[in-house]
Image (cartoon, coloured by chain):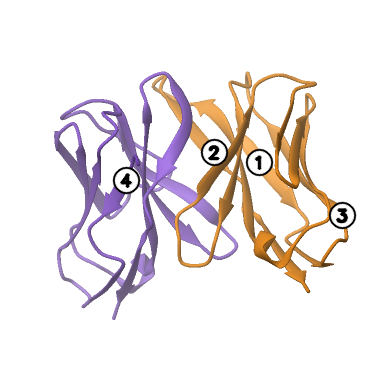
Amino acid sequence: DVKVTQSSRYLVKRTGEKVFLECVQDMDHENMFWYRQDPGLGLRLIYFSYDVKMKEKGDIPEGYSVSREKKERFSLILESASTNQTSMYLCASSLRGGGGYTFGSGTRLTVV
Amino acid sequence: EDQVTQSPEALRLQEGESSSLNCSYTVSGLRGLFWYRQDPGKGPEFLFTLYSAGEEKEKERLKATLTKKESFLHITAPKPEDSATYLCAVQAVSDTGFQKLVFGTGTRLLVSP
């Protein structure tokens, strides 16, 4: 069964901490994505990557960075966590040509 | 700007009461419209992809249709286990030429026994 695995389901961090969210896929997909999901705002794209070491800003990249050192792994980094980054974070992957995404189960991050 | 609007925001049905969810979109050159189901606390799960006006896809009690401006997700004789949030997304092209999905805010469906 193909999978996108996010390392943590729930995470509580303090304001100002550096936070790493990890995502691994086993489908040999070229594209990987990070979204955040908030009530009333839907899914908003933070960053995406279409190849190893390549990244593109999405619609709301401020306060975030990403790393893709290997094809199967895509990390989201909150350089200095703030309370407005409390959210559900979803990782997804897809084939290079586009098409449907496969999502992970999400990480619910709370910044206190 | 590429945009997806879903209605209603929430829908409450009795078991067996059929209805439809709406997804209207504006996108420069539709490359695909996607429907996902999301259960509370979980990631979205893929349901359907539609590529051209007139296309229809079915899965159990769900049927998705597509026109040039909107898509419908028809739910026939729903059961309580169909309760979830249903998300619609269109495939768009980023400023740098890469494909990405743009999502609507979803319709929360509650089916009561």
The reply to whether label 3 and label 2 mark residues of one chain is yes
Q: Which residue is mark 1?
A: B4
Label number found at residue A4: 4
Of all chains in the rendering, the one displayed in orange is: B
Chain where mark 2 sits: B
Q: Which residue is mark 3?
A: B18
Q: CA distance from mark 3 to mark 4?
A: 33 Å
- Residue at the outermost left position: A69
Q: Which residue is mark 2?
A: B102
Task: Give the drawing colour for chain A.
Answer: purple
The reply to whether label 1 and label 4 mark residues of one chain is no
Left or right of A73, for residue A111: right
Q: Are marks 2 and 1 in contact (CB under 8 Å)?
A: yes
Q: Position of residue A26 (x, y in %)?
A: 25, 37
* Lower sequence index among marks 2 and 1: 1
Q: Amino acid at mark 2?
A: Val
